[in-house]
Image (spheres, helix red, strand yellow):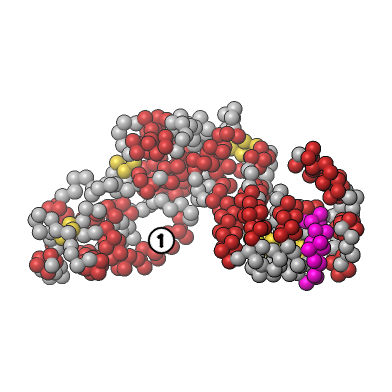
Amino acid sequence: QFLYFIGVQRWAMTTIEAEHAFTVYCSGKSCQELYVLACHENDVRPNTDLLRSLPDTVDFFEMDELDVSRNYLGATGVHCLLDLVRANRLMRRLNLSGQGADDQTVLAVVAAVRNHERLGHIDLSNNAEVTVEARDALVKLMQENKMVININVRGTAIGAATQRFLDRLGDDNNMLEANFFKGDYVRLKRTFCELDAEGHGRISVSALLTQIEIPQVAAALEKRFMMVDDGGVTDGYLDSSEFLRFTYPGFNNIHKILEHAKREDNDEQTIVSNWKTVVAALHRGRMEFPGLHLIRLWHREISLEEAVALLRRTLEFMWEETSEALMTDEGKVVLTPTAVQSATNAIFGKELAAASEEREKLWGSIGITPQYTRLMMEAFAKVHGSASVCGDKGGTLYDVEVGPLLAESERIVDTETVVLKTAILQSKHHAAGIGATIRMTFPEWFCYVNEMRSIVFYPLCAPKDFSVAEAIGNSPLQDGAPPLPEDGAAAS
């Protein structure tokens, strides 16, 4: 009855109207009744085993899966299942394997599940009458309904190439949730600002969920929020820090940042000390390495002997890459960054991994050193004042603008190991498409800068005022120190 009604009225009905009409049609019926009515409309006898397996409770449409692979229904019999699929909006899996389905059957299935909110897996395998004529409809379904992450057409006449393409589309759909939460501060900040058009600093959870077009992302967000804000207050609203805490990987509120900043560390001093030791070894072996800043050995101070071993291993990697080495006019060997990094991993990789693991246990999710954290706090406070760092609600202050930070003509941070260039940050900020006067809390700004640390975190050259003579003078050079290869050997 319903299928006839929709067929007659489809030309005059919108999708919303059709869905409403279907809901009215299902009201007061059970899954068993829907199946029996559909069978009568198609002049098909209901499958007894299938009928017994269906719920008989009125208005109970909460089936999670419909698997008829053990009950042969035929192409027409599959058509009788489609009202069941549409009515059960929580259904995640539909198995129609080996049912004698044909292209028209597939088109009917696609039409029935095009707007399904939860169906992720559709098994059409072992239906030999399904051909390439149904391919475009299946591809379009996966492109339009991002909930569908797997369509199995193995054992049909569609072909392996189409199956591989459908698998790739499914992988893309499956990654939508992961991509949403992958850590793009600018995109998430834009979402927050669009929902907070009046600038109150708070957004409605329900308004946020209605703006998410991808069902699995909306479901994940709803599960994360659970309508509970910071402090256990359930009011259905989130400020910017609460919003990022639920959506941005590794976001830390002001309390965690302040706790982290209080920790003692000497990473930067250790890195500089090891730079000086490596420079002494470079001078001893008549070598140069313009990318000295790439060597960031922070876990402990290395000896001159270890620096010599590092350069020897670097040469070995270079000889494996090419039989020729770049030489300067003074006859010095120029080391390549790739070879140096390979040698560093070969010699110190296990130590660095163990130290990182130990530090992760101690410091938690913040992958930034306490000294770097303190520098960022000082930079922010220099422009906005110390009160802007903590705020009056533990970092939820919303009237701090990032514009003055970007307007600074000089580098906000400039040390031997950390350089924050406002010009670079400003250009990236504008390229991201957000205004220079966007309001941020300090935790937001800290998170934003850390996201770009691949550009602004490390200096782009060797440390300033870094004298080779001074480095050698302060290094433990002794007559008994292991020499590098002779000049002629190093240059060969």
Tell me which amino acid carries mark 1.
Answer: Ser
Among the 4 quarters of the image, the one containing residue 151: bottom right
Please name the residue that numbered disc 1 is placed on: 356
Q: Residues within 10 Å of mark 1 (few under 14, many from 20)?
A: some
Q: Residue at x 31, y 31 (%)?
A: 409
Give the residues in magenta: 70-85
Q: Is residue 162 above or below residue 17?
A: below
Residue 23 shows up from this direction: no
Magenta-colored stretch includes residue 396: no
Q: Is residue 114 above or below residue 430?
A: below
Q: Residue at x 68, y 44 (%)?
A: 227
Magenta-colored stretch includes residue 80: yes
Q: Is residue 174 left or right of residue 470?
A: right
- Pinpoint residue 326: horizontal percent, then vertical percent: 17, 59
Name the main secondary structure of what is drawn in magenta: helix
Q: Is residue 311 above or below residue 382?
A: below
- Pinpoint residue 390: horizontal percent, then vertical percent: 48, 37
- Pinpoint residue 206: horizontal percent, then vertical percent: 68, 40
In this orientation, which residue lies closer to the viewer: 326 or 445?
Answer: 326
Among the 4 quarters of the image, the one containing residue 425: top left
Q: Residue at x 58, y 56 (%)?
A: 169
Among the 4 quarters of the image, the one containing residue 171: bottom right
Q: Is residue 226 left or right of residue 397?
A: right
